[in-house]
Image: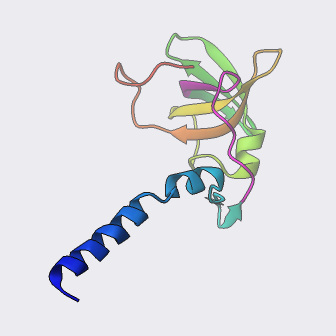
Amino acid sequence: MNDSSRALVLAAILALGASLPIAAIAQTHPLPQAVLSRGRVDRTPLDPIGRSRHNVFGTIVSLATPRLVLRTRTGRLLAVDATTALRKGSFSAPLFAGKIVLVGGLFDGRRVLHALTITRITRLDAATPPDT
């Protein structure tokens, strides 16, 4: 086999490989995602972020597990029910009064935020994204 034949075979292999729909396979059969949580693997699907989920930044004013009160950037007090976040282990430990957190969750009819995640952050300033 001469050099031109080898080059032709290599070009054919590369062209065939480039034409395979690898990206389509990855999109139709996504790998299952596992979330490590407090030493165990939680295989429940992640909660979608959409119009019904809210992200609120604030400072913990009072903490009486599983309830806490946040003071938002506007100075408003917000009641948070952290039962789900604590049960799933989806929080940054330790949580105590005076710490700044990002709470992701769902509001109920009484305007209580039911936390799915609670994440401690270092500071709350102009660079912090707006609440959603």
Specify the segment rendered in magenta: 43-59
Where the N terminus falls, by quadrant? bottom left
Give residue 110's quadrant in the image. top right
Coordinates of residue 118 in the picture (x, y in percent)? 60, 39
User: Which residue is at the front of the view, 48 or 14?
Assistant: 14
Q: Is residue 46 magenta?
A: yes
Q: Tell me residue 127's x, y (percent).
A: 34, 23
Q: Residue furthest left?
A: 3
Q: Position of residue 18 (x, y in %)?
A: 40, 59
Task: Answer left or right for 72 relative to 50.
Answer: left
Q: Which residue occupies 41% across, 65% down?
A: 17
Q: Is residue 51 above or below residue 48?
A: above
Vertical placement of 97 versus 25: above or below?
Answer: above
Residue at 58% of width from left, 42% of height from top?
95
Q: Residue 9 lies in what quarter of the image?
A: bottom left
Q: Residue furthest bottom?
A: 1
Coloring scheme used = rainbow
Residue drawn 40% across and 37% down?
Answer: 122
Q: Nearer the viewer, residue 121 or 15?
A: 15
In terms of secondary structure, what is the magenta stretch mainly? Answer: loop
Q: Is residue 93 left or right of residue 109?
A: left
Quarter of the image where the C terminus is located? top right
Task: Identify which residue, 86 or 7, lies in the foreground.
Answer: 7
Q: Where's residue 63, x and y in %?
A: 67, 34
115 left or right, relative to 24:
right
Q: Quick check: 33 left or right of 109?
A: left
